[in-house]
Image (tube, rainbow, N blue to C red):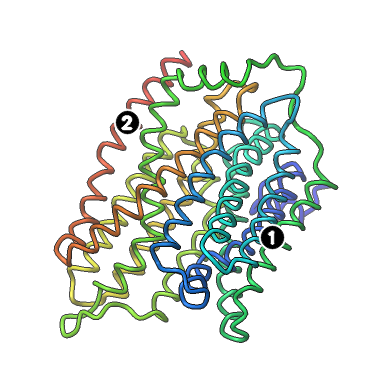
Amino acid sequence: MTNPFKAWLNRWLPDLDHRIWILAGGRLLSQIGIGFTLFYAPIFFVDQVGLTATQVGLGLGIGSLAGMLGRFLGGSMADSPRWGRRPILLGSALVSALADLGLVLANDFPIFVLGNVLMGFGIGLYWPSTEAVVADITPEASHSEAFALVRLADSLGLGVGVIFGGWLIAATGAYRALFVIDGVTYLLFFALVYFTIAETLAVQVDRPSIWRGWGQALSNASLLIYVLVNVLFTTYLAQVQSTLPVYFHQFVGNDAARQGLSEATLSLLFTWHVVLAAGLQMPVARRLTALSQTRGLMISACLWGMGFTLVGLAGISGTFPVAWAAAALSIMALAMVAYTPIASALVVMLAPKSQRGIYLSINSMCWAVGYAVGPPLGGWALDQGAAIANGFWITMALTVVPALGILHFLEQRLDQRLE
């Protein structure tokens, strides 16, 4: 006899290996810690430690470069029988916890840079190895749902961390406590992986050397075509997190006084964005499993174009600015949840089983490139004044056209490969 509760549960939640749920739980923990520090660390180091905004930006940029190295090593070592997925996951947690210790102690620029280098390196190690584990223990038909679950944990953890981090700062002013809590969450993640997840790397598979593996991956034309569009998608995400709050604050208002949206309004809008993304992640992933990955990415691209157009209209229109902004963030939440799980599933589909870590490392590097290009580009546009700032979002919407062309070409290429 069918258990009605289990049937109801399976209707709303994916039936996945328990280790996927453990990984998602660990990611939820660590993202809560990241949410504690993400928005508040720059404020602390400028206002209380005394670093300049330029020094803080430089330290964060150097950390991103360290993240590139971490992604390269993490993907390479995750594919190596000498290392495997599990040790890299454990190492990423320890390096990230050590980074928080550096940030707790930082009272000058060199220690601040050291903390960011370790943090960037630890996060770089994490992504290729954890996505390789997800791919190893999940049937191909369930890849999109499994990756969606991990991304859902990301969104929920980040949202909880931002909210409670703000509450803690308002109540105590203890900024350094945020780094301590972040470090503890990484140690909890370490313990969770150590005690519950065994190695998933199939050691019996023939594997090329690291350099040969990277050479083979970088000679995969389908992967390189995908990289072009993936950098665009990650640039879109970076604009939402870095440029969009400043644009709403400086340029979106009513006809009488274009003073921008208040911090309180922005907090509500972006909380709505995070909550909506978390609520839609699993339903959207399930809906899109009926489509090819390239078609799913085309839908995401169209949604990004609609979202950026609405952002431009929010700046141009003098009426109902909050409504325009809320509509834009709602559409972009849909675009984000359509993109993130499908992108990882597509890369896993392209990758030989012996090179999943390397392929997912390349996928993760697209994020690093997008986040390196997006914020400076958006910041430059905002510095040029209202006309350029408003036009910037229309230009971003137009970049969806070549993205759709690239995805169509990739779909034709993959269809020919399957024939």
Q: Position of residue 111 (x, y in %)?
A: 58, 60
Rendered residue at 50%/64% (across/down):
274
Asked where in the image residue 233 lies, by quadrant, the reply is top left
Rendered residue at 29%/50% (across/down):
305
Q: Earlier in the sequence, mark 2 or mark 1?
A: 1
Asked where in the image residue 307 lies, by quadrant, the reply is bottom left
Q: Position of residue 19 (x, y in %)?
A: 76, 44
Asked where in the image residue 266 lies, by quadrant, the reply is bottom left
Say which element carries label 1. Answer: helix
Label 2 crowding class (10 Å Cα cut-off): few <14, some 14-19, many 20+?
some
Whether residue 256 sits left or right of residue 175 in the image: it is left
Query: Of residues 219 and 336, which is closer to you in this image?
Result: 219
Residue 248 vertical position relative to residue 122 in the rendered view, above or below: below
Rendered residue at 35%/32% (across/down):
407
Give the Cα separation between the discs numbered 2 and 1.
Answer: 37 Å
What is the number of the mark on residue 406?
A: 2
Rendered residue at 75%/26% (across/down):
82
Amino acid of disc 1: Leu
Label 1 crowding class (10 Å Cα cut-off): few <14, some 14-19, many 20+?
many
Q: Position of residue 108 (x, y in %)?
A: 54, 66
Amino acid of disc 2: Ile
Whether residue 267 sits left or right of residue 17 in the image: it is left
For label 1, the residue is: 29
Say which element carries label 2. Answer: helix
Residue 125 vertical position relative to residue 390 in the rendered view, above or below: above
Q: Position of residue 414 (x, y in %)?
A: 43, 21
Whether residue 108 sits left or right of residue 333 in the image: it is right
